[in-house]
Image (cartoon, rainbow, N blue to C red):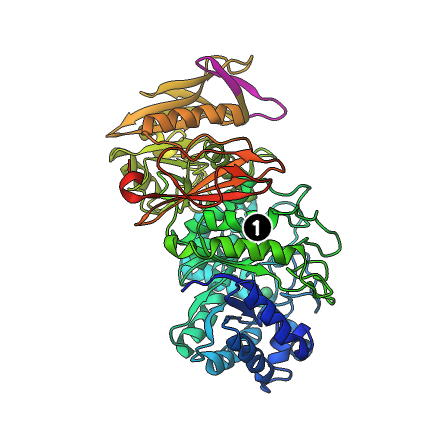
Amino acid sequence: MNFQFGVDYYPEHWPEERWETDVRLMAEMGLKVVRLAEFAWNKLEPAQGRFDFTWLDRALAVFDRHGLKAVLGTPSAAPPAWLIAAHPDILPVDSEGRTRGFGGRHHDCQSNPTYREHVARIVGAMAMHYGKDPRVVGWQTDNELGNSHEDTCHCRHCKTAFQIWLKEKYGDITDLNRAWGTVFWSQTYDSFTQVPTPALTLTAHSPSLLLDWKRFHSDLIVDFQQKEIDLLRAGTTCQFITHNFMGYFDLIDYFKLATPLDFVSHDQYPWGFWDVPPGKNPGLLASTLDLMAGLKGQAFWIMEQQAGPTGWQILARTPRPGQLALWAAQSIARGADTVVFFRWRSCTVGTEQYWHGILPHNGVPGRRYEELKALIAALAPVMPRFEGALSGAEVAIVHSYEQNWAFEIQPHHPELDYVKFAQEVHAAFFEKNVPADFVSDRADLGRYKLVVAPLVFLDLPGVSDHLKSYVKAGGHLILTVRTGVKDTANVCLAENALPGPYGELLGIEILDYDCLRGVTVPVTLGQISGQGRLWWDVVTLKGARILASGTGTDHTGEPAATAHTSGKGVAMYWATVPDQDLMAVLIDRALVDAGIESLGTSAPGVELARRRSAEGDFLFMLNHTSEARSQEPGQGWIALVGGTSLAPFGFSVFFKPVQEGKV
Ligand SMILES: [Zn+2]
């Protein structure tokens, strides 16, 4: 169920006399769907048990008259003042023991049974009222789950819930003690009720406790969402359920959060006020969208696509003319089937007064309205042709929330960051215009010719066998430093030398390593040179061949990258974190060996992205620069939108039918 374009609207923020004008203007620019009500708890339930849907009914009637369908958000991210006044223990407690007060949003604890009861009442009432309403096509659970909860809650309910979670996982406290190694520093527990949350203490908590806490907290939010989903599924017919994800946000295992949803939605803000100017680069934006497609391996929605300058107390730069449309086109190029802009009109009140919408504060359509209207006119007619299609990538990058959490707990090197490493790997493919999917560590890898699995630190159940089978069957796999180091409880493996269960597959052994604090190691690969950064494994060859070697004073002649044939495939190892130059060469070699072709060579700053449908290939050419660019798509492509001349921040779409598109 797709609508191509929509907008987020807050009828409760504006006089009712204005609604008709707003919705007429939306329809005139080609918008087909609107998201409503995700923060409107107090307007929908002004006092406990007293519901008022009349205003939302009237708003839906206006949308219906103009042909727009609605997605309703459950309002659990904004518990009203009356609820907090009656039940202040709903408020979250931070890791320093401070209760966070009412105000802002998300001022709640997701373990709190009272809060959950009230959420169930409002969600149940909404499902009852709108569950069979044909004007409502779907639901968004909560809003940006986990947002504002980065510190996690340490209240008594969360502590108890954590202890119950541990008991369910370990069964007996002696098993937890053994798994975590609580003999260290006399931390042995007699019962689960003695296990603390990782609140403020004098030194550092056990890495095993910290990892389980992160898992628990992710599970807690997944469970919180599931309760809403259960209520919605019970009360609705034919309406989809989605949630607005936040790209690389990492408090929750997004693969698990996505599982029960019909599809993933994402909030895409290329220039958020938190970014250093000029904001995220095009490759990083592309990787964020590819991660969102990877969560369920399917096309997605953008539920909030940037529609103007962003800011709360501080503002980001104003997108240049054409840039908002370009960013929306990029979202579509990388798998969005519907793009909903945030928001319709810049709000005059509240924290997000400067989070600008399509319309300025005065409500008069201006350049943003005209720019996005032109975008919709150009793209909406062709979008149904590639609905549901993704890039058809032959490269996958394994992404694991648990591995990321382990590195958040112990980064090793201050600059070693799991997500950043994954983004650098993605960037190497992006620069070559090679589509690359993000996949979970348990995903079916059969359709990929090349898989990169950075930092497979924890030996999680089944993963090493899964990756070994992939190589044996003919896959090309790249593993990196800090692979096969620990068990699932975040305890160091000691049965074999590093890289633990991967030694035989990779044909190497690592008996020594060097955290590269304050130094890099020059590396040569044929005529090409680069730098090894952050970490250096001293590799002993046990059948592998050397791809690149160190030349610095400390690690001269030591392998920087190796390859080992195993079964029908090849397993490669990066014994250091390659800089951009070295990674580009290593990826080039791997692409050639795996027989993977690029979408083509592009002019500087021009992104190429493909959606491969049953009908054929759709090629997007996106000019992320402020200068005009000329870009040829190659042989056999038919122009659908625009052409080979790309205006500053312009884009075009080409098509190649399937019989010519298949190599
Ligand atoms: Zn709590």
Q: Residue at x 72, y 62 (%)?
A: 353
Quarter of the figure that contains the C terminus: top left
Residue in the foreground of this view, choosing between 208 and 621 = 621
Residue in the foreground of this view, choosing between 618 and 641 = 641
Q: Residue at x 62, y 58 (%)?
A: 369
What residue is pinned by disc 1? 325
Camera sees residue 274: yes
**Vertical side of 172 occupied by 431: above or below:** above
What is the tally of numbered marks visible in this picture? 1
Q: Please provide percent x and percent y for residue 382.
A: 42, 54
- Identify the amino acid type marked 1: Ala
Residue in the foreground of this view, choosing between 156 and 26 = 26
Q: Residues within 10 Å of mark 1 (few under 14, many from 20)?
A: many
Q: Please provide percent x and percent y for residue 407.
A: 53, 41
Compared across the picture, whether 443 is left or right of 75 comes to left
Q: Please give the range of residues in magenta.
A: 515-530
**Vertical side of 127 occupied by 462: above or below:** above
Residue farthest bottom in this picture? 50
Camera sees residue 487: no
Residue farthest right in this picture? 313
**Vertical side of 564 occupied by 352: above or below:** below
Q: Is residue 522 magenta?
A: yes
Compared across the picture, whether 217 is left or right of 395 comes to right
Indicate which quadrant contains ligand 1: bottom right
Q: Please provide percent x and percent y for residue 659.
A: 26, 41
Q: Please provide percent x and percent y for residue 376.
A: 52, 56
Quadrant position of residue 79: bottom right
Q: Is residue 574 magenta?
A: no
